[in-house]
Amino acid sequence: MSGPNTNFDPVQVTPLNADQVEAMLAEALAAIEAAGNTTDLKQARIAHAGDRSPIALANREIGALPPQARKEAGQRVGRARGEINAAIARREAELKAAELESQLAAEAVDVTVPVATAPVGAPHPVTALMDKMSEVFLALGWEVVEGPELESEWFNFDALNLGPDHPARALQDTLWIDPVADGKCLRTSTSPTQLHTMLERREPPIHVVSPGKVFRADEYDATHLPVFHQIEGLCIDKGIGMAHLRGTLDHFARALFGDVRTRLRPHYFPFTEPSAEVDLECFVCHGESVGNPARPCRTCRSEGWIEWGGCGVVNPRVLVAAGIDPEVYSGFAFGMGVERSVMNRNSATDLRDFVEGDIRFSRSLLGGAR
Ligand code: DAH
């Protein structure tokens, strides 16, 4: 009655028991389903389909079964492994798609969202016009020079033939530097650059313009600024006179303001003889408001002309102060207010707008000044 045990019951090999395989499969499928991302899924794959997973270990047991039991156990385990691998592949595809989706969502660019544009600055209208004025003269072959803003009394007054008692020297007009006895002041006009230029160049011909800041002890209001800008012009050569001045100013005015007429009105300046004030034809009414109460013009106060600057034939005394022989050379000079020129060109009416730093002011005038 002895002999090999041919009644070996394969169900007795625990890992291959049908319930056990079903349980492994169910556990594996649950873990795969529960994996919320590809990293979790990788863990689930190692745990439930890797070399040391219960199902892999069960698979190894198959060889230990009696031959007649192997086929059925092999099918059962093989089907379970196939299901597990298929579930992993399915879940992996799902998770990858979801991850791609969320990555795309996170990186999405909405081109319709309004962007905060960095504000762009604008050249100040005074700077823009000074550049333009300089360009007009550069095109004529003139040079652009700069002079110091801190001046000595000699350059600012004496050399320009303003006598010791000239009212402009008074404290209420000129900003003197302490101690006043040292005779240093902030230049009250760009005219001292005439002297600097002539003393530096020595020999005419001289053709220069000099734009820059000037300073006066003035109130700060709609029509006055204690700091403003002028452009000075100086031409010295043989045989230069009033006609050259007139022609140059006409060209200057037309280059800046278009087709306008100029007018010279006799005036007095200590550094020119004869001297004149130069007016521009009113760019608003073109003179039509003059003597016409029905059409008053606020811009020129119905005078038809707007004051632009001063000019004249250089006083021989100024040439002598600069070491230039007035018997050989003569010249003309002019000085224009830059803020006033901007106002003529555009319709700015309050000088305070020039210094308050509101970019809208610069932007609104740019079109005209460039
Ligand atoms: N310096 C004068 C002023 O500030 C302007 C001026 C007038 C300049 C006549 C000149 C000139 O060169 O010839 O009011």
Image (tube, rainbow, N blue to C red):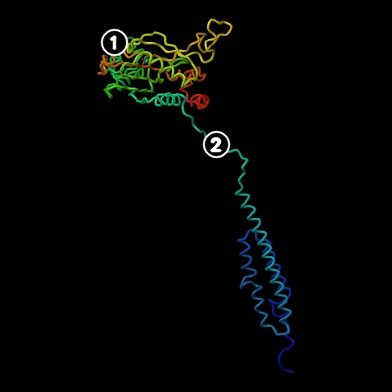
Residue 186 location, quadrant: top left
Q: How many marks?
A: 2
Image quarter where ligand 1 lies = top left
Residue type at mark 2 is Thr
Quadrant of res 316: top left
Give the crowd class for mark 2: few <14, some 14-19, many >=20 residues within 10 Å: few
Q: Camera-side residue: 311 or 220?
A: 311
Q: Is residue 312 above or below residue 204?
A: above
The kind of residue on which mark 1 rests is Gly
- Looking at the image, residue 11 lies above or below residue 102: below
Q: Residue 338's x, y, as percent?
A: 43, 20
- Pinpoint residue 27: horizontal percent, then vertical percent: 69, 67
Residue at image location 56% in from the left, 8% down from the top: 296
The one of 137 and 175 positioned closer to us in this rendering? 137
181 left or right of 370?
A: left
Q: Are marks 2 and 1 in contact (CB under 8 Å)?
A: no
Between discs 2 and 1, the one toward the N terminus: 2
Question: SS class of the residue under badge 2?
Answer: loop
Which residue appears at 71% of the width and 67% of the height? 26
Q: Is residue 343 left or right of residue 90?
A: left
Q: Disc 2 beta carbon < 8 A from ligand 1?
A: no
* Mark 1: secondary structure: loop
Residue 210 percent coordinates (x, y):
37, 23
Of badges 2 and 1, the one in the foreground is 1
Instruction: Specify the quadrant that holds the N terminus.
Output: bottom right
The local crowd at label 1, few if under 14, some if 14 to 19, many if 20 or more residues have their Cα within 10 Å, is few
Residues at marks 2 and 1, CA–CA distance in whole angstroms: 57 Å
Dividing the picture into quadrants, the one containing residue 241 is: top left
Q: Residue 249 location, x and y as percent?
A: 42, 17
Which numbered dot is residue 117?
2
Q: Above or below — where is 192 with respect to 289?
A: below
List the residue tagged with mark 1: 163
